[in-house]
Amino acid sequence: MNEHEQQQLMDGLRALAALEPLQASPRVEQTLRATFRARAERRRRTIWASTAAGFLAAAAAIAVLFFAPVPWHRNTQAQQAASERPAPGASVPAAQYAVVRTDELASSFYPLPEADDLPPVETTLVVRVQLPVSSLQLMGFSMGEDAGAEPVQAEVLLGQDGLARGVRLIQ
Amino acid sequence: MFGPRSVILIALASAGAFAQPGHRGMAPPPGGPGDFAFVRGEFGFSRKVVTGAPYSAQASTQFTQTLADGTHIQRSSTASMARDSQGRTRTEQTMSSIGPLSASGATPRTTVFIHDPVASMSYVLDPSAHTVRQMQISQRGPQSQNGTASSRARPMAHARHGANATTEDLGTQVIQGLNATGTRVTRTIAAGSAGNDRAIQVVTETWYSPDLQMVVMSKSSDPRFGESVYQLTNITRAEPDPTLFTVPSGYTVMQGGPGRGRPAPQQ
């Protein structure tokens, strides 16, 4: 670029700088504003919907935790029956029994891991024992490292051979 | 509120987990050395009512567990069993152990369980305290089976063991004077399915008497938990003494069935 060309470029730039600022037409501005408002509205709705969904999920989780039938429940009418959840190997027992005090909490019987390979149950005996939580490990439950020596009461479901098929905790 | 739930969740999460044989680091329960303290018998019942096949016998179970260091743990439990022609059963169980767990206390506790489908009652007797817990039972449909051999009475050949199990017919043998048919179920736990680097075989052998409609001997061998042998001995097929199925005089009836500790009001 020679001096003449440089001079022409500078004159052109000065002329351009001297012009009044160019603005969009009012119609274009209105269209842009409307578009931004619509986007903002959609974003607000999305945020509210997400928040509401979160609250609904939390409420549903709380409802499930508090009201859904779970293995551990209060036997207000002594309706816990051993036959509700027979141990492995035991067919549905011939009779139902109310077995838990009305002021106690009891879980259903949980089958012990080794019980699946024991002979079929013909006669079932249920005995109540007191034992440290850690002793449940000897029965096949892995209670974790923090399982202590705190005694708990449990009902043990025995077969005719005196071997445990299931256990449930009593509180 | 979440304490019990947490315990159950832990228990659920552990179902199927390997036991830890030899874990002896727990403090003894109240009542002296031992893994558990016997509190009381709660109730007992028979899976099916068998009529016309009376018997009385002694039952014994030997449980053996071998720890990783080679230590052997042996437990045993005994019981006197009887059944009359009407299908009433009596089990007098001496509770000195439950599998690998040993009971605390110098003298094993004995509990008598009577199941009386005729009177629709179930009794649990505590001979040491002379107390009895009683409860009414309701039968759920016809369950009675007479003493004739019935295919329905035969155990289901361990169908519950699933596809990884093989069942062998061991034929018929005379055990304690009774014809018994044998079945051996071998279940294989494939390598890697439970964190095991090699396949594990669990073998259960059952000898069933069609005449008595009950198992007269069984053996179970599980490398994870131990071996157990259950056997009926001194089997007598005469009608047992009827008084065995009734509550002896002088026993205090504990009101409200199992779990309650209040004596019934004197009448």
Image (cartoon, coloured by chain):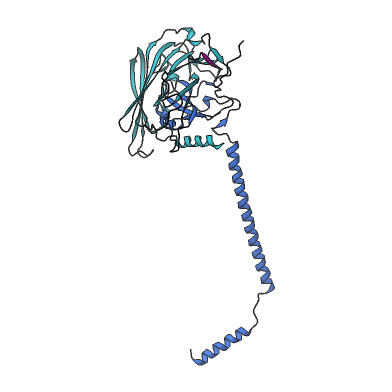
Chain colours: A blue, B cyan
Image coordinates for residue A156, horizontal then vertical, percent: 47, 25
Is residue B218 visible from the viewing direction of this image? no
Asked if residue B130 is among those painted magenta in the image, a careful observer would answer: yes
Q: Is residue A122 left or right of residue A27?
A: left
Q: Residue furthest left?
A: B70
Q: Quadrant of the C terminus of chain A?
A: top right
Q: Residue at x 51, y 37 (%)?
A: B6
- Which residues are the magenta region? B129-133
Is residue A45 visible from the viewing direction of this image? yes
Q: Main secondary structure of the magenta part?
A: strand
Q: Residue at x 64, y 78 (%)?
A: A22
Instruction: Classify B133 as above or below A66.
Output: above
Between B48 and B266, which is closer to the camera in this rendering?
B266
Instruction: Classify A71 as above or below B207.
Output: below
Q: Is residue B140 left or right of residue B93?
A: right
Between A36 and A156, which is closer to the camera in this rendering?
A156
Instruction: Classify A93 as above or below A64.
Output: above
The quadrant where residue A72 appears: top right
Between B186 and B234, which is closer to the camera in this rendering?
B234
The quadrant where residue B153 appears: top left
The quadrant where residue A37 appears: bottom right
